[in-house]
Image (tube, coloured by chain):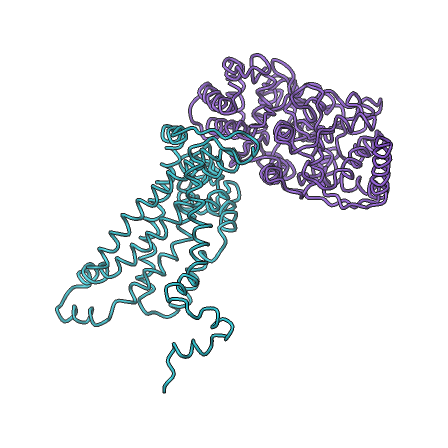
Amino acid sequence: MSETPMTRAASATPPSVARRIKGLSDRAIAWIFVGPTIFLLLAINIFPLIWTVRLSFTDYKANRAGREIKNVGFRNYERILNDSDIWLNMQATAHFLFWTIFFQVLIGFTLAYLINKKFKGNDLWTTIIVLPMMLSPAVVGNFWKFLYQPQIGLFNYIVAFFTGKDPSSFEMLGSVDLAPWSIVIVDTWMWTPFVMLICLAGLRSIPDYIYEAAEIDRASKLRQFFTITIPMVLPFLMLAVLFRGIENFKMFDLVVQLTGGGPGSTTELTSINLKREAFEKWRTGYASAYAIILFVTVFGLASIYVKALNKVKER
Amino acid sequence: MKHSKLTTVSALSLAVAGLGGAAQADDLTLCWAAWDPANALVELSKEFEAQSGHNMSFEFIPWPNFADRMLNELNSGGKLCDLLIGDSQWIGGGAENGHYVKLNDFFDAEGISMDDFAEATVYAYSTWPKGTPNYYALPAMGDANGWFYRKDWFARDDIRAAFKEATGRELGEPKSQKELLEIAQFFQGREIDGQTVYGAAIFTERGSEGITMGVTGALYPWGFKYENTPGSYDMEGAVNSPEAVEALEFYKEFYETATPPGYTNSYMGESLDAFKSGQVAMAMNWFAFFPGLYADPDTGGEKIDFFVNPPQNQEGSTLGGQGISVVAYSDKQEAALEYIKWFADPAVQQKWWDLGGYSAHKAVLESPDFPDSAPFAGDFLEAMGAVQDFWQEPAYAELLIAMQKRMHDYIVADQGTAQEALDKLIEDWTEVFEDEGKL
């Protein structure tokens, strides 16, 4: 009789364990295996989420353990939604999200398209391009802070070289107009390689015979690009947008290193603002409501987006 | 019989506790910020180790993370620190939330009198509620925000002549806030020895407390008050008074016209760097750094001098400094109290000043030799006579973050007017006090 995986597993089970599970149904055994994972999921994800919802209706402060906790109903939600400063933080986050994704997709796809063409040194260039995403955001933040320094920063000197402006006449991190763009530039520099790699995977998954058939049909390169390349890479692109969108919605470290949310509150993204409310002001109830609003927003947008992604994949 | 048995047991317990205290060497951890005076304290504490047999360890946190790190430690009931030299503004929270041990009984038992310490420091660093004889810390490190400048530049004939021509008066230490700005504007962008220099380094930092500590250096001399009546939380007309608006506009003008380029998020470290690199003629910073600045081989010694924050409508300096407290969660409170007793000794306090710490003990400050004991000693005394501190409420962090935002929005990000910034600040603070049940 040949050995099957089932018989191999049965013979590998120690006799003491075999005795204990003897008589248990398959369903019970399945629960034994899945149970710890479900317990961890409940303990680490679901319970805190439910607890956060509960706290969001109170004036609880985590740094004042002895203080009486009062139920405040929807007051925290009302305050957040009526707070013009929080809407400014949302706008700053939307600006950051939109432009980082726009530039990363544009440049990432272009780089992937070029790297996909076989040329000498192809692998070396790929390695060089992906270097920034291997660095720590804290390091990148500090590094770019020096580059942006108006008196000695290389960035200002490069801009000055091309524009003829005095290098210390503009401040990337200190100007209300330029600071939001300065964080977009750094995030794009760091994460474009990630989008490029995903696009590259998409481009390399397109079978050559499709292009050969198009050649036979005398389709132009431009036509091939819009009718073959783009539609077939689109699911990959959308996946890259999803990853970068989720990552940048919770962006914290890089921006804190670069601007600390300033000047003023110009680059204070929602994640930075939320951290201030929760762990500097210790308004735990208020911060919980804030977190729930952000969670619902991201979850809602991500769900719509994933549905769209699935439709594109089905085509 | 029962009574005498109980007495015997108590006496035995006390004797055992006393013996234990004398014989057992504890490992004490003292937490503070990482800066020059902390190094002096390490040196000073060696004497305590030798005397007591206890071992001292130190946990020094960089200033930008100090409040976050230490307040989290206290809030979580952590046992990392047995002794904490905490910022003056933490005293309310430390007392009300039970983080600090109340020291009254200990002071009485050991004969430590708060009358022996400078009144301003006892009020600011030790008492809660403010001004009441309830002590949660011993004044450890007196401090205020002061100024230092390039004495060698101020003494140069060509610069003095240019200043006289530009302003019609002699170049010297400013006697008012407006003179301070005038001098800073004079130096802004000036060529000195082939290098472009700037007026002054001031505090503009957004993340922790920087811009608040800087701007209050202008607000207090203009007569800024937090409340119309102390303890009433009636801020309308006090926080946004015409004087406060004028002071805020002044600080913004200072930032825009007399600071180095890119000086948008700067605090203690940046101020020191700007001065030591020869970039600025003047800089604001805490007195705690002055011994180190004076000792600097490049810009210290004969090249530097110091002055107290200049008055405008009145004298006023922003209070820094800290008291030393025993952490309520420590298992080694006995040994920690021993340290406090040792530290309160006048001879130790004198050594503390000699090593570079700022003693608040009257035996040191009122010594006839004190004003001449360092180039900044007289200025320090003057500053401590007119210090004002930020709110010391348990909700101080919320109050501080609100002020950081409003000030940075107006001064650095150029959003709105000074009046709007202060009006919004009152709204923020009112919300905090309403949540606290104080309004």
Compared with B384, B203 (above or below) is below
Q: Nearer the viewer, residue B237 or B221?
A: B237
Q: Colour of chain B?
A: purple
The x, y position of residue A308, in whole percent, is: 24, 51
Work out which quarter of the rendered image holds the N terminus of chain B and state it. top right
The x, y position of residue B350, in whole percent, is: 83, 31
Q: Residue at x 84, y 32 (%)?
A: B2
Which chain, by letter, is cyan? A
Compared with A81, A253 (above or below) is below
Residue B320 shown left or right of residue B5 in the figure: left
Image quadrant in which you'd find residue B179: top right
Residue B412 visible in the picture: yes
The x, y position of residue A257, in whole percent, is: 50, 44
Residue B303 shown left or right of residue A287 in the figure: right
Q: How many discs mark residues in the rendered view?
A: 0
Compared with A288, A234 (above or below) is below
